[in-house]
Image: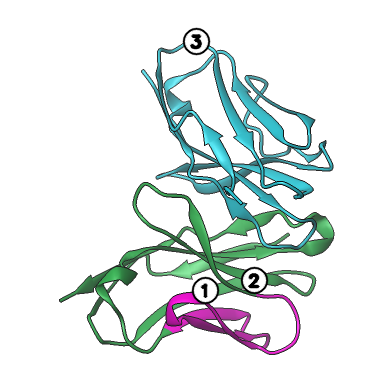
Chain colours: A cyan, B green
Amino acid sequence: DAGVIQSPRHEVTEMGQEVTLRCKPISGHNSLFWYRQTMMRGLELLIYFNNNVPIDDSGMPEDRFSAKMPNASFSTLKIQPSEPRDSAVYFCASSLGQGETQYFGPGTRLLVL
Amino acid sequence: AQSVTQLGSHVSVSEGALVLLRCNYSSSVPPYLFWYVQYPNQGLQLLLKYTTGATLVKGINGFEAEFKKSETSFHLTKPSAHMSDAAEYFCAVSDGNQGGKLIFGQGTELSVKP
């Protein structure tokens, strides 16, 4: 299997622009997770889906962030409008289900100027 | 609520020396515990995990960890460090009943000196 695929790997944008991060989970996995990693806050769970349904979005920082999972093989994390404090590495992970091992993608490194 | 504390944000060892990375957790229910490794500019890779059963868990690259309920600890060890072990290590706890979301510690950066 190709593993979790994320795109783009790097994104540089200007404050106020819309940013869309994409994730393709491992085929057959039922759970998908979005994490954010920063020096100040470490690794934080933003949102996770089970069978394409958002289960817990309590980690989403504010209304500027939204996530969708229209089907089992694709998810997006959107930031609109972006701000410099959104600069971070965003990871997507997937697992077979509750309590199972999460497999992480390579991450998207986002820089908002 | 669950939480993880990793003692020491930076650990430095000599090549061939014992590696010990400390992790303590807090959980109101039996936890699932994980250690992940992150190499520079890469995603996280699972080293090992504890769910139930044997409390001494062996993982990849010669690492192992022991679940000690009485001490609420899950320390990671490796008998002999290699240069290639230099990376950041994350301990995480999950309550499977909550969908498996992971709560991570702040990470420990391991340096290996020649």
For residue A76, side relative to residue B98 (left or right): left
Query: Separation of disc 2 and disc 3 at Cα?
Result: 39 Å
Amino acid of disc 2: Leu
Mark number, residue A18 = none
The residue at the point 72 percent across, 69 percent down is B27
Above or below residue A110? Residue B65 is: below
Whichever of callouts 2 and 1 sits on the residue coming sooner in the sequence is 1
Is the residue under label 1 in contact with that under label 3 (CB below 8 Å)? no
From which residue to which does the magenta span run? B50-77
- Distance between mark 2 and mark 1 Cα atoms: 10 Å
Question: Are dots 2 and 1 in contact, CB under 8 Å?
Answer: yes
Amino acid type of the residue that numbered disc 1 sits on in the rendered structure: Cys
Label 1: element kind: strand
Residue at mark 2: chain: B
Label 3 resides on the chain identified as A
Residue to which mark 1 is pinned: B23
**Eyeballing the image, is A39 above or below B18?**
above
Type of residue at label 3? Gln
Give the residue number, with chain letter if any, for mark 2.
B33
Q: Which residue is mark 3?
A: A17
